Amino acid sequence: MKRMKVLFGNRRMMVLLTLAILVLTATALVASGASFTATSANPGNIFTAGNLKITTNPANGNAVAFTVAPGNMAPGDTVTGTATVTNTGSVSGRFSLKGAVNAGGGTTPYPATDNDFAANLLLTVTENGTPLVTNQPLTTALNIASLQTSGGATSWAAGATSTYTFAVTFKDNGVDVSGVGVDNRFMNKSATFDLSWSAVDD
Amino acid sequence: MTAKHLTRTKAGKALLSLVVLALLAVALQSLVFSDASFTAGSANPANVFTAGSLSHTNSKAGLVIVDAANLRPGMSKEGTVTITGTGTLTGVYALNKGAVVDNPASPGLSKTLVLFIQEAGVATPLYNNRVDLLPASLTLGAIAPGASRTYLVRLTYPTAAANPALQGASMTLPLQFAGVTQ
């Protein structure tokens, strides 16, 4: 007891002891890693991809239906068909049309004279009534830039529709000096063209 | 540096924040610069155009329609010819006259003989007058594929036109049936 009284009665010792305790406490507070935390949540963040889709009438894979069957054309005849194209996707896109004369393939050979027949078929295409190509030979009409980029310059919103009219005229080259039809050489000849529609999102 | 140390120390938390920001930056860059696009396509292939044909058969092709040998005043001789459409297209047909040859040229048998042409089943004849007055072309009408028209052709030597100078005379009358698509 006397020793304790001596030990704790020493004021200097009391101060040092107190400081040591304070230092130890502060160190514990800094080094323990304990922190206040708070949280909040933003649940249900859903990201969904849109889609770009072309729907045509006639449907994909089907030929254009012409008002008069184009299977028995005479010089001077014109046959007309219509196709509608709709952006049935959920995003906007730029649509364009390309075409190609089918110069071969299938079960029927495509001799040179059939190429001439295609050159005597004149194509006129309108888009919503506005001409894209007018009376151009089938062999070259489908490569015309205005046809390829039709609609490509403007964006189609989802649900937008355009109507395309195709008129094909069998050019009448008349008769020769003997009175024989110049176009007799095309009797029973055939020409075929393919149309392809494409779209790219904006 | 343990994971527990990363989440519990200020330095660790700062490092974690930087890592997250870096990951977000990489993801954002991927979204902006990937050039990926949606595309769609549809096709209307095999649009076929075929030319038809125009042709016909002539039942007397290459032959005379009327064998008018040894005609005498008051006598008639006749024959028929049938034209049938055999192509896929309808044609508008005409009977065309070629160059008439009289031997002798004068007085000319073509100026005496009367030509009568009538379509079977049609009351009104197509022509009924002297051979030399036949127009260059007579319109016959449309003949559809598979359809036929038959024509009666008659040559008459009128009694009133008898001319001794025409004894032994001859006349050649070329005729052609020609069709054109409508």
Image: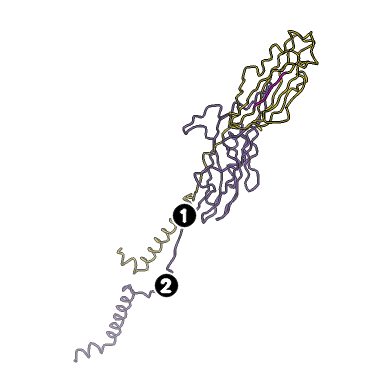
Chain colours: A purple, B yellow
Q: CA distance from mark 1 to mark 2?
A: 28 Å
Q: Residue at x 63, y 26 (%)?
A: B83
Label 2, secondary structure: give it.
Answer: loop
Pointer 1 chain: B
Camera sees residue B42: yes
Q: Nearer the viewer, residue A112 or A45?
A: A112
Q: In the picture provided, is B28 more to the left or to the right than A36?
A: right
Name above or below for residue A6 compared with residue A39.
below
Magenta part of the protein: which range? B150-155
* Pointers 1 and 2 in contact (C-beta within 8 Å): no
Disc 1 on helix, strand or loop?
Answer: helix
Q: Crowding near pointer 1: few (<14 within 10 Å), some, many (20+)?
A: few
Mark 1 residue type: Leu
Foreground of the two, B153 or A67 = B153
Asked if one can make out residue A146 in the rendered structure from this viewpoint, the answer is no
Q: Is residue A140 magenta?
A: no
Front-most of residues B101 and B43? B101
> Dot 2 corresponds to which residue?
A40
Residue B97, position as x, y percentages in the image: 71, 20
Q: Is residue B181 left or right of residue B28?
A: right
| Image quarter (top left, top right, bottom left or bottom right) of the N terminus of chain B | bottom left
Query: What residue would you read off at disc 1?
Result: B31
Q: Position of residue B180 (x, y in %)?
A: 66, 29
Q: Which quarter of the rendering shows the C terminus of chain B?
A: top right
Quadrant of the rendered image containing residue B173: top right
* Image spot of residue A106 (x, y percent): 47, 34
The picture places residue A72, in percent across and down from the top left corner, at: 58, 34
User: Could you tell me the amino acid type at mark 2?
Assistant: Ser
